[in-house]
Image: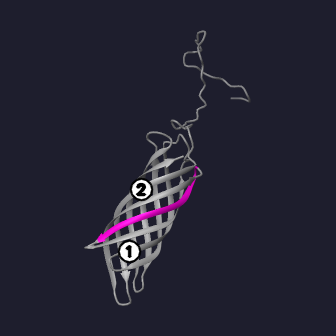
Amino acid sequence: MKGKRGIVEFPNRGRFKNGDVIRIDDGVWQEKGLDGNGKRNYSIALSASIGQTKETSKTTLTTNNVDHGEMQTEVAFGFNFRWNEFGPLISYLISKVDDEQTTTSSIGGFYRYNFKENKPGAEWVPYAGLAGSLISQDSDNTKRDGLGFRIMGGTNIFPLNDHVSLLVEGRFDYSTLKSDNTESTSTGFTLAFGISSYF
């Protein structure tokens, strides 16, 4: 290529007939369906996670360590700016140790950085992010309040259209809770699956 002139080579040595259409590719790869339809400005997501958590409880006299399984349900509303997504997050968690059942509810927010633009036409969008929340926990004997933090990574997959995605996400959660005479910390890894609707 020199200036606005260039040489184009054709595999059939330029043998064309009347009416033949010639298309010159620009050589730029595009993901299938990159120019999709509709919008992805906002999202509503519902997810459920399962995992194992280690809890350390301290009083003035004792320290106890307990491992327990948990199942958590979350609802999130997001604002999507293609490379960045953020919004409020509400969750509800049930865990059981021996015969004691504990319910935990929280409200907070999340931020995700997308490693590719989340726009109509993108069929999968990997991401990493952070979340924080205010926590209220009730069990058979005590009520505790505290803070929760999360590191997460996953991907949104759009198998059917530009608006509905399947979510797969790995999470590391850390929380601190306090009552009148007890302070506890919890850490754990969970795997979450969910569905999101973009509009």
Report which residue position mark 2 lands on: 47
The residue indicated by pointer 1 is 138
Residue 27 image offset from top left, x and y in percent: 58, 32
Residue lying at the far bottom of the rendered structure: 61
**Stretch of the chain drawn in magenta:** 82-96
Is residue 116 placed above or below 67 in the rendered structure?
Answer: above
Numbered label attached to residue 164: none
Q: Amino acid at mark 2?
A: Ser
Mark nearer the N terminus (2 vs 1): 2
Which residue is drawn at the image coordinates 35% and 69% (left, top)? 53
Q: Residue 193 in magenta? A: no
Residue at (49% x, 57% y) in the render: 76
Q: Amino acid at mark 1?
A: Asp
Which residue does the image show at 40% across and 73% down from the upper left? 137
- Give the image quarter of residue 65: bottom left
Q: Is residue 85 magenta?
A: yes
Looking at the picture, does residue 18 appear above or below residue 42? above
- Does residue 176 appear to the left or right of 140 in the view shown? right
- Label 2 crowding class (10 Å Cα cut-off): few <14, some 14-19, many 20+? some
Location of residue 17 in the rendering, given as x and y in whole percent from the top left corner: 58, 9
Helix, strand or loop at label 2? It is strand
Q: Looking at the image, which residue is at 41% across and 58% down?
A: 170
Badge 1: residue crowd in 10 Å (few <14, some 14–19, many ≥20):
some
Indicate left or right for 72 with 98 as reference: right
Q: CA distance from mark 2 to mark 1?
A: 22 Å
Q: Position of residue 166 (x, y in %)?
A: 43, 48
Query: To which quarter of the image does residue 12 belong?
Result: top right
Residue 19 pos. (x, y %): 60, 11
Q: Nearer the viewer, residue 98 or 113?
A: 98
Q: How is the image coloured?
A: one colour
SS class of the residue under badge 1? strand
